[in-house]
Image: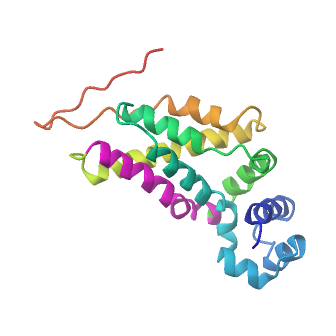
């Protein structure tokens, strides 16, 4: 069993130092002590490496959404679940600033993001659809994408500011700007948007 988080942290450090395009599988293998064959079997491509933690975050998110009671409004439930899915591992504090720098500067890495985040966004979309059965699927997916983008932006800002403070609090502050307030009315008119109190 390999330590995917350690490999990702090592790879990101190498990419910051040498550049993504000039650092191959062999370099990562030498730095981690894991064979090229094992690395390729586990990750598939180098571009998959930085997203290794998303799968665990999606699992934490789904587990949190399953515990939400029906009396909690949808927007509040989503915010709480997303915030609780943010890890507090030491690795995120060490690697986040370098991770952001590398990912933001390499289009090849950003191309993988939608696929990497698909399970995470899918959990959000399913929850929204469950709470709002009359909502078109496109609405559930669009709102899920908005929550994913907001959470990612919050973590990116937190990392670029030096990873000071708790990452989940950074996400919480950002998500308080978003809220889901039910569906369009039966006659097709625009739903009333409620502003969260100051």
Residue 81, how many percent across, how many down? 51, 40
Was residue 77 drawn as part of the magenta stretch in this picture? Answer: no
Residue 21, how many percent across, how many down? 75, 71
For image coordinates 25% across by 26% down, the residue present is: 192
Q: Quadrant of the N terminus?
A: bottom right
Which residue is farthest bottom?
Answer: 37
Q: Which residues are magenta?
A: 108-132
Q: Is residue 133 left or right of residue 77?
A: left
For image coordinates 31% across by 42% down, the residue present is: 131
Q: Is residue 185 left or right of residue 172?
A: left
For image coordinates 89% across by 70% down, the residue present is: 31
Q: Nearer the viewer, residue 60 or 128?
A: 60
Q: Nearer the viewer, residue 20 or 186?
A: 186
Residue 76, how many percent across, how many down? 44, 31
Residue 193 occupies quadrant: top left
Q: Is residue 18 left or right of residue 131?
A: right
Q: Is residue 11 above or below residue 169?
A: below
Which residue is farthest top?
Answer: 198
Q: Is residue 52 above or below residue 177?
A: below
Q: Mostly what secondary structure, the magenta segment?
A: helix
Q: Is residue 16 above or below residue 134?
A: below
Q: Is residue 187 above or below residue 119?
A: above
Residue 36, how many percent across, how many down? 79, 82
Residue 39 occupies quadrant: bottom right
């Amino acid at each position: 069993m390999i330590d995917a988080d350690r490999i990702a942290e090592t790879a990101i450090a190498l990419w910051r130092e040498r550049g993504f395009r000039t650092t191959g599988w062999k370099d990562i293998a030498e730095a981690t002590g894991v064979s090229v064959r094992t690395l390729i079997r586990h990750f598939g491509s180098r571009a998959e490496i930085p997203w290794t933690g998303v799968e665990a975050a999606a699992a934490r998110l789904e587990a949190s959404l399953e515990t939400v009671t029906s009396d909690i409004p949808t927007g509040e439930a989503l915010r709480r679940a997303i915030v609780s899915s943010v890890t507090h591992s030491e690795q995120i504090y060490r690697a986040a600033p370098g991770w952001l720098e590398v990912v933001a500067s390499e289009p090849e890495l950003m191309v993988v993001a939608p696929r990497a985040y698909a399970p995470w966004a899918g959990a959000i979309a399913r929850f929204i659809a469950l709470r709002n059965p009359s909502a078109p699927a496109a609405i559930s997916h669009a709102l899920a994408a908005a929550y994913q983008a907001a959470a990612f932006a919050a973590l990116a800002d937190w990392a670029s500011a030096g990873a000071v403070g708790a990452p989940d609090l950074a996400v919480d502050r950002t998500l308080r700007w978003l809220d889901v307030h039910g569906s369009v009315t039966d006659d097709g008119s625009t739903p009333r948007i409620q502003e969260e109190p100051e």
